[in-house]
Image (tube, grey):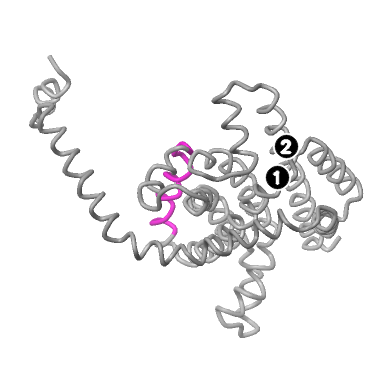
């Protein structure tokens, strides 16, 4: 007895034969393709500015003299962490990447991670604020975030590729969708963890809801929001490797090619470069978050 017949007997549901199932699938697929062809010109217009921004930042990272990019990265890392140890170790890691002739690929990956992180932050913080201020929005969006965080990373590529095609922008969109969930959750959590006493004090001074959000809730939630940024960067780096399957270059492309060609050393070196970047950003963002936490505690 087939599964369809068993379902009909046990549950009372009508069964469908293979022909009907194939016909239903074909109808859905054809309808989706027609829809994509119909909205294709509008999609091209919408993603064109994003394509220009991504290409411009990638060109800036790749074509700028390496020592200028090197100095800027180290300056940002030291300003964020205020740690000479993290800065020196980051310099050593970047020098190793350059000596292994992976500088250009690393810059392509960094440009992708930079743009996707900024987009995830710009979209995730407002949604997190909305969830924090509205229980209805939280109950509506939580199941969506649960699904986003449980789906395998490869699944994100399917609808993105079918709608946007192959290229850097589809990969960027997939990275943003994959990485935005922790930004939303931790922004919501940070604002909700602000003590009622602080909110009551702001109300006593006659603060408006906007003044209370801007002057009390967001500053006190900043360490938690920084943790969300940290997780967003890590997830963006992880997804960039997967997104290389749809045309994103950089270190992820090299890792994918090494897997297909079974080049162990190429895959290992490029994988270690991705790990080095992840560790650099992780330590710097964590150090910055700890500084904010100490400042919040008055230390």
Q: Are marks 2 and 1 in contact (CB under 8 Å)?
A: yes
Residue 88 % position (x, y): 90, 46
Mark 2 or mark 1, earlier in chain: 1
Residue at the spot of label 2: 273
Residue 138 placed where, x, y %? Answer: 44, 58
Q: Magenta stretch: residue 89 in it?
A: no
Q: Is residue 159 left or right of residue 179?
A: left
* Prevailing secondary structure of the magenta residues: helix
Crowd rating for badge 1 (residues with CA inside 10 Å; few <14, some 14–19, many 20+): many
Q: Is residue 68 above or below residue 270?
A: below
User: Which residue corresponds to mark 1?
Assistant: 106
Q: State the extent of the magenta-drawn residues as a range.
A: 138-153
**Residue 139 painted magenta:** yes
Where on the picture, by quarter, is residue 140?
A: bottom left
Q: Nearer the viewer, residue 286 or 89?
A: 89
Task: For mark 1, give the secondary structure.
Answer: helix
Residue at screen point 86% across, 46% down: 91
Quadrant for the C terminus in the image: bottom right
Specify few, some or many for label 2: CA neighbours under 10 Å numbering under 14, 14-19, or 20 or more: many
């Amino acid at each position: 007895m087939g599964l369809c017949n068993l379902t009909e007997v046990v549950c009372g549901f009508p069964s469908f034969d293979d022909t009907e199932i194939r016909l239903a699938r074909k109808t859905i697929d054809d309808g989706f393709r027609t829809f994509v062809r119909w909205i294709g010109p509008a999609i091209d217009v919408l993603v064109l500015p994003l394509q220009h921004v991504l290409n411009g930042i990638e060109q800036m990272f790749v074509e700028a003299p390496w020592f200028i990019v090197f100095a800027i990265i180290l300056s940002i890392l030291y300003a964020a962490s205020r740690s000479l140890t993290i800065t020196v170790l980051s310099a050593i890691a970047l020098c190793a990447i350059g000596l292994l002739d992976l500088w250009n690929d690393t810059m392509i990956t960094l440009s992708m991670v930079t743009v996707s992180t900024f987009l995830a932050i710009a979209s995730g913080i407002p949604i997190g604020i909305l969830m924090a201020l509205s229980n209805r929005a939280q109950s509506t969006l939580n199941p969506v975030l649960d699904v986003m965080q449980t789906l395998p990373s490869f699944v994100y590529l399917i609808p993105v590729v079918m709608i946007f095609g192959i290229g850097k922008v589809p990969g960027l969109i997939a990275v943003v969708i994959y990485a935005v969930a922790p930004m939303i959750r931790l922004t919501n959590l940070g604002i909700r963890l602000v003590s009622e006493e602080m909110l009551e004090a702001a109300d006593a001074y006659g603060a408006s809801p906007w003044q209370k959000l801007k002057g009390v809730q967001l500053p006190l939630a900043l360490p938690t929001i920084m943790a969300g940024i940290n997780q967003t960067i890590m997830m963006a780096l992880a997804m960039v490797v997967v997104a290389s399957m749809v045309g994103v270059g950089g270190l992820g492309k090299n890792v994918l090619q090494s897997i297909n060609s079974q080049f162990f050393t190429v895959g290992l070196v490029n994988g270690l470069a991705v790990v080095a970047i992840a560790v650099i950003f992780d330590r710097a963002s964590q150090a910055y978050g700890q500084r904010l936490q100490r400042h919040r505690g008055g230390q």
